Amino acid sequence: MVKVAIQLWSVKEAMEENPEQTIRELSGAGYDGVQLAGDYGKSGAEWKKILTDNHLEAAGIHMPVTALENQSELDHWISFSKEIGNNKLIIPFVDEEWRTLEGYKKLVHLMNAAAPKLNEAGIRLGYHHHDFEFQTVETSMTGWDVIEETADRDHIHFEIDVYWTEYAGIHTYNLLDRLKDHIFSIHLKDMVEENGHKRTAAIGKGSLDLKGFADRVQTDWLVVEQEHFDGNPLEEVKPSAQVVKEWYK
């Protein structure tokens, strides 16, 4: 059975206001898990109770890149992950200072160095991209080229965001096929174009072949995400869980 999670960044305002109520509503909407974007000021024990009470699992955690440079910060995320039953830690974003040839090389070096310790703890390390990684940083070389070519494939995994690959003009099917054995998570969000501007949309409300992308990979979770809304974000993301599950009935 397919398991569907939501990246909690999608409902960040609701999480800031009332995380317990937000999680209850997401569970009620049919989500099987949540992917955390930080710890929201709560301990691992508190999170474990919230997840257990709502019959949810952890589908990964987005942790800051600073954790790769600070051992105590990394140790926090390891212990936090163990407490809540999480087995994926994912670098979700890097600031502009990293977006150079040397910056990407440093990023991969740090990831390669941290991954074995995480593996010993039963946790896999991954990287989540946006569109900027596909921009050229050296003659005919992009940031993604650096990441893909120098990451230790035995230890580093990828969380592919199909909205951002499409936004960047990347052939998503080819990327998924090429990296299939190294993709441990996928972000599904739809795309609409209005007045020449692209934006995210709820699953099934846009133009992307999301099921086709999902069928291209073997992951334990399909992770829904949405960044742009017309109304209440929490209400807008609720139907997406059932839309994805309908694909596999």
Image (cartoon, rainbow, N blue to C red):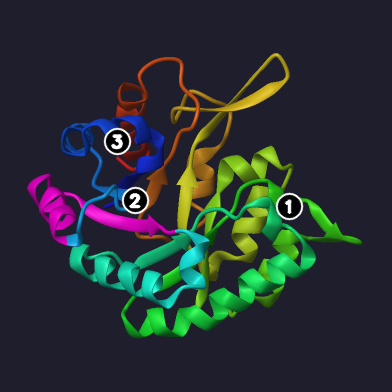
Relative vertical location of residue 11 with respect to residue 32 in this rendering, above or below:
above
Residue designated by label 1: 134
Q: Residue at x 73, y 60 (%)?
A: 143
Instruction: Find residue 37 and report its horizontal and vertical position in percent.
Output: 38, 49
Q: Is residue 57 magenta?
A: yes
> In the rendering, which numbered label is found on residue 16?
3
Q: Earlier in the sequence, mark 3 or mark 2?
A: 3
Q: Earlier in the sequence, mark 1 or mark 2?
A: 2
Q: Residue at x 10, y 53 (%)?
A: 49
Numbered disc 1: secondary structure? helix
Marks 3 and 1, how far apart at CA: 32 Å
Eye-nearest disc, 3 or 2: 3
Query: In the rendered image, which quarter contains the C terminus?
Result: top left
Q: Is residue 104 left or right of residue 75?
A: right
Q: Residue at x 39, y 72 (%)?
A: 74
Eye-nearest disc, 3 or 1: 3
Relative vertical location of residue 224 with respect to residue 61 in this rendering, above or below:
above
Q: Residue at x 67, y 46 (%)?
A: 131
Along the line of sight, the residue nearer the viewer: 233 or 212: 233
Marks 3 and 2, how far apart at CA: 15 Å
Q: Is residue 154 left or right of residue 20?
A: right
Badge 3 density bin: few <14, some 14–19, many ≥20, Cα 10 Å:
few
Q: Amino acid at mark 1?
A: Phe
Residue designated by label 2: 35
Numbered disc 3: secondary structure? helix
Along the line of sight, the residue nearer the viewer: 195 or 90: 90
Relative vertical location of residue 235 with respect to residue 93 in this rendering, above or below:
above
Relative vertical location of residue 199 with respect to residue 231 in this rendering, above or below:
below
Q: Amino acid at mark 2?
A: Gln
Based on the displayed image, in which of its 4 quarters is residue 232 positioned?
Answer: top left
Q: Start and end of the magenta stretch?
A: 45-63
